[in-house]
Amino acid sequence: MNFIGLCREAINVAVKAGAKEAEALVVHRHTIGSEIERAEIKTCTDVMDVGMGIRAVESRKVGFAYTNILTSGELKKTAENAVKASKASRVDENWRQLPRRKGYPPVRATYDKRVTDVTSDETVLLCQRMMAVAHEVDKRVLPAFGGVEVLVQEAVCLNTNGVEVEDKGTSLVCALGTMARSETQVSPVCYEFKASRMYEPDPEWVGREAGRLAIESINIGKVKAGKFPVLLEPFALEAMLTYTLVQSVRGDIVSRGRSLFKDKVGKKIAGENISISDDGTLAGGLRSGKTDMEGVPKQRTPIIEDGILRSFLYDNYWGRLEGENSTGNASRGGGGLRLPPYGTTPTIQPTNIVLEAGTVTDDELIREVRNGYYVRSVQGAHQSNPETGEFSVAIAPAWRIKDGEIAYAVKGVMITGNAYDMIKEISLLGKDARQVQTFIAPKVVVSELNVVAK
Amino acid sequence: MKETFTSVLEKLRKRGASYAEIRAQNNNNTFITVRDGQVEAVTLSTETGAAIRVLAENAWGFSTTNSLEQNNLEKSANSAFSMAKAAGRSVRETVKLAPVKAVEDKATVLVKKDPREVGISTKVNNLLTINKTCFDFDKRIKSVTINYADLATEQTLATTDGTFIEQEKMFVWNYCWVTGKSNGIMASARDETGAHGYELFDLELPRKIAERVSKKVTQQLEAKTPKSGLHPAVIGTNVVGVLAHEALGHICEADLALAGSAVMGKIGEKIASEQVTIFDSALIPQGFGALKYDDEGVSGQKTLLIRDGVLVGFMHNRETAGKMNVSPTGNARAQDFRFPPLIRMRDTCFEKGDYTFAELLEDIKFGYFLEAFRGGQANLDGTFTVGVQSAFKIVDGELGDPVRNVGISGNTLETLKQVDACGEDFGLELGRCGKGQYMFVSPGGPPVRVKSILIGGS
């Protein structure tokens, strides 16, 4: 289908119906996948979803409409609906204008033809391999759920300010959640995955790691409450900072007075060893691409450099309002009702948040903790308070570190603290980083967190 | 439409599908976001699509299409069939779907006000009233976000077993996030509510919603963080349903139970104190889980999970019911046509007891009253967490000062044994649950007292 032509047609209808500015976005997603359920591949899926979202602005009143039926008649109705919605809305004092045309950066390793050729049969084989390897680790490992998913996405965005951009991307994910049972204990779910934009499936690694984690989680020992140094894996760090730090550097949150960092640009908010950027142009990054979801080029934005707060993340709306440029962080879809990407107006979301790695090996990190805890994942981080940074989360899988070595797994333990204090108390950063969701981070050691247990 | 669907299904059956279903939808949705009084975007949507699920060779194939034309349905059906064949190659266990009676029915939602017939301007005005009431409530209120949605779905479900159900679904949902600031301290509170029709704003006046959430914010501004450790607690009606949902509900979803959750193999065992009865129901009319049929055409019903402390059942779809030789419970639900149905909760609640609120508190020397939740999460091993946005100390049997940011955590099999009294009131929340797809659910129950639970503070 000629998406650019369809977008142009929709924009023309909106303008004819009275819109002063108009924008059309088409997102086409095709996923093929196999799903694992209790050590069996029970389901294969082939899901195509395409739709168009149309934004119409008239006298600073913004309307939006979307549909997944891309016929001329339905698109005309949808464009008219967008104008109708704008007329029924109220003046948005904050509205400036839609993004203007700009050049796009070259971004490497975000699309791979070989990924588009993956068949459902191949995803089944990858699942089988992943489970077989997990089972080889130990017979007590149960691959409880997981799967392999291939995504091919194409997005097209046009507006009346001259933006016209297409971006294609691919990804391939192998994921496995395992559990293990001994006579007396059951492990928490241990989750491992490998996601890549290029054709780089690694079912063996995922199976081996998911199996190892489950087995290492059933040897459960005694918990000690109190203040301890804690080693956080990227999984835990991502969860704990996404609902706190990342929220507080969003331009809309800052602009609306809900961020502790409002007047802190240029000031020290983290330890000197902490540098964090948002990089939507990183080669192979899971959230990399040439354009964001309203046609603004993606870019690298420094957030914290050597502990000093440098800048916030913006989309077009909040950027213009604050007199800053959009940082290419407009995202669409999702939210509380998991709408499709063409189904919402933009919100500010990070692309790839990069926490710069240090120089310390895993063994050294554990030795440095000496007497504390090793946390792979946390549960309940989305209940943190973004305004204050306060969190209180259960840790699992997690292990006790004694005498500089991992001693045994622990259960029924919470850690509590404040994320904004925590970024000042990271004493060590590991040398190897990996991407989990939006975060690319190494393992870190926090010098002291409150460990709560029975 | 019926003829088209039957013909597509019949072809699948002839090719060797042991079961197939078409679930087609027409959706009309409205979304409105208001941020600090600015109407950010009024959104109108029209969607059409069908999900086709095929069981062949003991495996499932799933495919979707955005067109209900026969040739597109057939294309999608063929794809679903080959998906099932691809998965089926490795499957070792057989799938036996629990039998159900074929149903032909037309089910409507009883609402007083169909949201599709309410003007955009009325909807916007109500949200602006919430916004203004919040800012007028207290000058320390600094920021108000309101997300509103109404979703109207006309669904047709046709299966190779002869079921053909046309069913309406309607949800009106309102979510506020309000932030206050005082002397450099920031605090926020959330409020989520809903109904099946636009009568929501007659039942819950915009003013009332605004005052309820604003009051929580101002309380939070004065609150201290709690003492960490094991404490007795009274879990309020707003939080208790989330406890039922997170601590028990998820691990009693039969797919997760079979995957090895903490309650697997424990049917008939006493896993909670005798005061505890927990059910999951599709029969509470105002609940978000109220549905005449689930997305496999199984009738909605009330399913007991724990009776007087004994685990008596799980929530099932036809596949898990067949595997465990029980009747399906009507818990197969899908977010929309883009997703296959999964086992999802409906309205998951503790049953009432007969304690007054004062009686629940009176024997507690020091503990906490957990008033309103922020969110929750469950792990298959029975570890649950519930984040609490507002709470109060209980000192010598009386409510004391407010505390903020309380997290509770525990293991189902230990915590439910600690429940020693249930109150006589009953509350129902109208919220959402995420399991890869979102779903509207209503957790609920009376205030419940637990002898001891792990409280995380700072």
Image (spheres, rainbow, N blue to C red):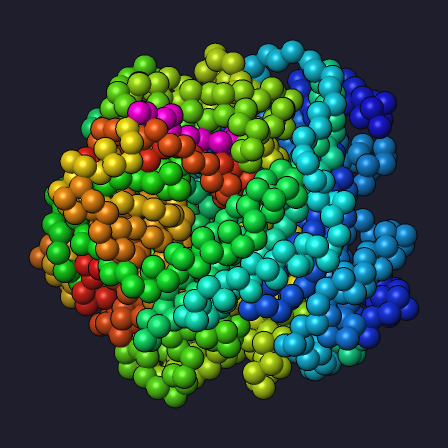
Residues rendered magenta in the picture:
B343-354
Q: Please name the residue shown 56% across and 14% down the image.
A: B98
Q: Is residue A280 above or below residue B367?
A: below
Front residue of this view, candidates A313 and B241: B241
Q: Judge whether residue B131 can be spotted in this image.
A: yes
Q: Is residue A96 above or below residue B202?
A: below
As drawn, which residue projects farthest toward the bottom?
A266
Q: Position of residue A112 (x, y in %)?
A: 63, 60
The quadrant where residue B289 appears: top right
Q: Quadrant of the N terminus of chain B?
A: top right
Front residue of this view, candidates B369 and B137: B137
Q: How many marks?
A: 0
Q: Judge whether residue A99 can be spotted in this image.
A: no
Q: Position of residue B358 (x, y in %)?
A: 25, 36
Q: Please name the residue shown 23% across and 47% down the image.
A: B399
Q: Please name the residue shown 78% across and 79% down the image.
A: A161
Q: Is residue B365 above or below residue A42?
A: below
Residue B39 in magenta?
no
As drawn, which residue projects farthest toward the left?
A403
Q: Position of residue A403 (x, y in %)?
A: 9, 57
Q: Is residue A340 above or below residue B272?
A: below
Image side of residue A162 versus residue B202, left or right = right
Q: Please name the residue shown 82% across and 52% down the image.
A: A70
Front residue of this view, candidates B50 and B145: B145
Q: Quadrant of the C terminus of chain B?
A: bottom left
Q: Position of residue B155 (x, y in %)?
A: 72, 32
Residue B349 in magenta?
yes
